[in-house]
């Protein structure tokens, strides 16, 4: 290895390390602050000067953690299940049929990535009211499914085109299996990597979203974790207890970290095959 290539490689590695440190510093400061007593308002840059779980206990109690966790799990699970089924079924014909209609539908779904959902929120609410759909704590599920379909169909379509050869379906087709049988019995079981990618990418933003929940959910007992965290934000009379707020943030992140730990081995494969080659 020449000195020039060695210097270039070392420079790249130093750049990567710098980027990692820049991203880790705020997390380290937040973790240090969360491990303080709620009444400890000293300089947050004095890292880990105190190790106390009092802020976690206060956050756990005040946000009714288990109730908010259950609400988040219900909203996220129902939304992700419908997204997986709808996106996979919509992507299958778009990936297999080489027609103008399938190409138009593919571009139609992709166009949803360009338009932010917040821009069309008022027309959507008016449409929900005109259709007589009740607005309650399950209404955000409709928005989550709608906003997740464009990116999910993009991943599924690319994965089916490049990752699942048509030959695997030919034997079943010769035996008389219909389209639905071929999809559910042969194709869908092979979509595990991209399905995990969809579950992680869409599940994370659904779990963390508070915009749609804030619009449609009005009762405290129906609040998911992001809305429950808003209760820790103070005002002029009651300043924000940052120690407790950061503790609540880490409590909300723990379920996602646990899920990602079990699913990460599928995540990279599904993202690369579905998004790069598709």
Image (spheres, rainbow, N blue to C red):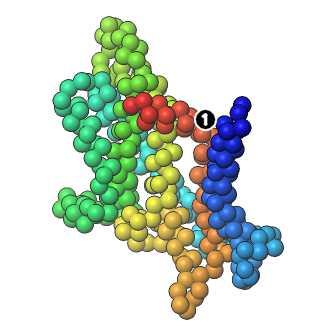
Task: Compare residues 18 and 277 and report the one nearer the observer.
Answer: 18
In the rendered view, does 177 fall on the left or right side of 264?
Answer: left
Which residue has dot 1 on it? 265
**Residue drawn 54% across the image and 58% down it:** 70
In the rendered view, does 115 fall on the left or right side of 190?
Answer: left
**Residue drawn 54% across the image and 78% down it:** 233
In the rendered view, does 104 fall on the left or right side of 82?
Answer: left
Q: Residues within 10 Å of mark 1 (few under 14, many from 20)?
A: few
Choose top left, top right, bottom left or bottom right for residue 9: top right
**Residue 246: x percent and y percent?**
64, 70
**Residue drawn 43% across the image and 36% down it:** 275
**Residue drawn 42% across the image and 21% down it:** 164
The secondary element bearing badge 1 is classed as helix
**Residue 187: x percent and y percent?**
41, 23
**Residue 258: x percent and y percent?**
64, 48
On-image quarter of the N terminus: top right
Q: Is residue 29 above or below residue 149?
A: below
Whether residue 251 is visible, yes or no, is: no
């Amino acid at each position: 290895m020449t000195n020039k290539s060695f210097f270039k490689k070392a420079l790249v590695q130093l750049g990567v390390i710098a980027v990692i440190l820049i991203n880790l510093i705020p997390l380290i400061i937040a973790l240090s602050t969360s491990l303080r007593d709620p009444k400890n308002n000293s300089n947050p840059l004095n890292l880990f000067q105190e190790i106390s779980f009092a802020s976690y206990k206060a956050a756990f109690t005040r946000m009714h953690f288990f109730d908010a966790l259950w609400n988040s799990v219900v909203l996220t699970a129902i939304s992700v299940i419908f997204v997986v089924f709808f996106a996979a079924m919509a992507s299958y014909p778009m990936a297999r049929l080489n027609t103008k209609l399938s190409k138009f539908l593919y571009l139609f779904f992709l166009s949803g990535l360009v338009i932010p959902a917040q821009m069309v929120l008022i027309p959507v609410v008016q449409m929900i009211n005109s259709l007589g759909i009740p607005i309650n704590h399950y209404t955000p599920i409709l928005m989550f499914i709608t906003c997740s379909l464009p990116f999910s169909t993009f991943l599924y379509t690319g994965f089916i085109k490049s990752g699942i050869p048509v030959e695997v379906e030919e034997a079943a087709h010769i035996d008389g299996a219909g389209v639905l049988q071929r999809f559910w019995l042969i194709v869908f079981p092979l979509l595990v990597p991209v399905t995990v990618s969809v579950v992680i990418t869409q599940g994370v933003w659904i779990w963390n979203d508070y915009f749609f929940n804030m619009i449609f959910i009005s009762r405290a007992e129906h609040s998911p974790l992001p809305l429950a965290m808003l209760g820790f934000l103070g005002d002029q009379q009651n300043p924000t207890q940052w120690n407790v707020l950061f503790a609540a943030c880490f409590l909300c992140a723990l379920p996602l970290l646990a899920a990602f730990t079990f699913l990460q081995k599928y995540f990279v494969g599904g993202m690369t095959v579905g998004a790069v080659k598709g």
